Image (tube, helix red, strand yellow):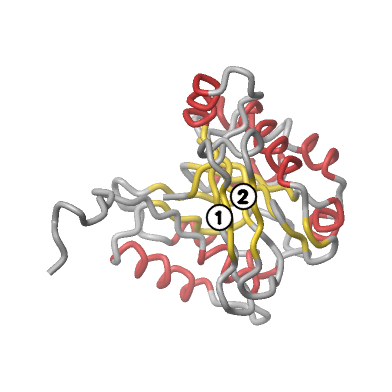
Amino acid sequence: MEDMATAPKLPTRVSVYEVSPRDGLQNESAQVATHAKVRLIDALLDAGIRRIEVGSFVAQKWVPQMADADEVCRTIDRRPGVTYAGLCPNARGLDRALAAQVDEIAVFVSASETHNAKNVNKTIAQTLKAFDPVIGPAVEQGLKVRGYVSTMWGCPYEGDVDPSRGLELAKHLLGAGCYQTRSAWALRFKPNRSWSCSPPNCRSSRSPCTFTTPAGPRSPTFWSVSKAALRRSMRRWPDSEGAHTHPAR
């Protein structure tokens, strides 16, 4: 039996932000019925999920699988203590999100120009500009806003991506009003490939961090950046620009 004194200390709680009703279903080639989406969300809530992204408020012609996001929000069984969120790329999407009475929205941008163009048909600069009538007004309306930074370390079109590009985008989103950003790879990596990030570029520790992709065709890794972490990093490293990343927990 493992000595309890030497056993690793585990967290007493974890926070799960579930995105399968949005990120999972929008990638399906077939249209999933509204009642089936509602059943999925109800099942996730029954399993104990309390933060859930229920849909995406985007143009139907671009993402037809999310065309019923408004109806899904009207139909789901709203439960106390649950945060219901929706992806929201522009002002029109924000209007729909407010009407759907979500508690939180998410905006998204890629660190790779090519991936961003393929994803939203805009440059990175144009995408950030489109957030001006979204993030601030959403916060004013009492909504929390999360920011997604895709292709943080790698892109299926451009290959490796300099992480500093993603960090700058994360800082921009936090400064615009997002309470947190989430970053991810978007590349079919070769198994067991490694990248290193050393101080001062990586603020998670004073020693180099190494990321190794596990065996498998697709291995996305998610990291988060919060305002609290940003403040901590600036206190710990006064000469830094405040970039801070830490593994999502």
Closer to the camera in the image, 94 or 172: 172
Q: Nearer the viewer, residue 158 or 203?
A: 203
Q: Residue at x 49, y 49 (%)?
A: 247
At label 1, the amino acid type is Phe
In the shown orientation, is residue 136 left or right of residue 49? right
Q: Position of residue 45 (x, y in %)?
A: 33, 62
Residue 183 circle label: 2
Residue 105 lies, in percent from the top left, at: 56, 44
Q: Residues within 10 Å of mark 1 (few under 14, many from 20)?
A: some
Instruction: Report helix, strand or loop for mark 2.
Output: strand
Say whether residue 179 is left or right of residue 30.
left
Rendered location of residue 161, percent (x, y): 77, 53
Q: Is disc 1 in contact with disc 2, using a CB cutoff of under 8 Å?
A: yes
Distance (Cα) linking label 1 and label 2: 5 Å
Circle 2 residues within 10 Å: few <14, some 14–19, many ≥20: many
Q: Residue 200 — which label? A: none
Amino acid type, label 2: Ser
Mark 1 vs 2, N-terminal side: 2
| Residue 132, picture quadrant | top right
Q: Which residue is mark 1?
A: 222
The percent coordinates of residue 168 (x first, y second) are 72, 35
Q: Nearer the viewer, residue 60 or 233?
A: 233
93 is higher (above) or lower (below) than 67: above
Q: Tell me where residue 1 sits by quadrant.
A: bottom left
